[in-house]
Image (spheres, rainbow, N blue to C red):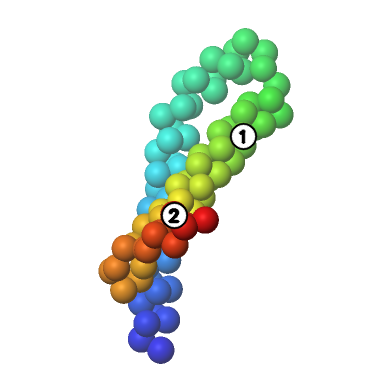
């Protein structure tokens, strides 16, 4: 039960940090978006660009996590044994 509560707490802190980072990123890009609107870019075009960048970032993070999980250490701290693949 305690592990579940700690997990939820860590997840809440992580989500809060992510929201803060996205907010700061959006404020930093406010000038760029204003210039794009001044050059008559449609709001849907700007939305698609921002959505594409966010999805690409999430995909890269997911792939990085997947490779780390696949080739990283096991939960017990031991490195994975790939010697069985050399005999194929």
Residue annotated with mark 2: 86
Looking at the image, tell me whether mark 1 or mark 2 is earlier in sequence order: 1
| Secondary structure type for disc 2 | helix
CA gap, disc 1 and disc 2: 40 Å
Q: Is residue 62 visible in this depiction of the protein?
A: yes
* Quarter assignment of residue 54: top right
Residue annotated with mark 1: 52
Q: Is residue 43 visible in this depiction of the protein?
A: no
Please provide percent x and percent y for residue 11: 42, 66
* Quarter assignment of residue 28: top left
Outermost residue on the top side: it is 39
Please provide percent x and percent y for residue 17: 38, 53
Q: Residue at x 31, y 74 (%)?
A: 76
| Secondary structure type for disc 1 | helix
Q: Answer few, some or many: residues within 10 Å of disc 2's Cα (few below 14, many 20 plus, some between 14 and 19).
A: few
Camera-nearest label, 1 or 2 = 2
Pick the front one: 14 or 68: 68
39 sits to left or right of 42: left
Q: Residue at x 35, y 71 (%)?
A: 75
21 sits to left or right of 56: left
In the image, residue 45 sits, relative to residue 56, either above or below, namely: above
Outermost residue on the left side: it is 77
Q: Answer few, some or many: residues within 10 Å of disc 1's Cα (few below 14, many 20 plus, some between 14 and 19).
A: few
């Amino acid at each position: 039960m305690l592990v579940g509560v700690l997990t939820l707490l860590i997840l809440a802190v992580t989500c809060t940090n992510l929201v803060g980072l996205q907010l700061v990123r959006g404020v930093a890009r406010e000038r760029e978006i204003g210039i794009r609107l001044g050059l008559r870019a449609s709001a849907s075009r700007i939305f698609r660009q921002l959505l594409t960048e966010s999805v690409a970032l999430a995909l890269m993070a997911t792939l990085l996590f997947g490779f780390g999980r696949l080739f990283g250490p096991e939960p017990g701290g031991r490195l994975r044994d790939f010697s069985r693949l050399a005999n194929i």
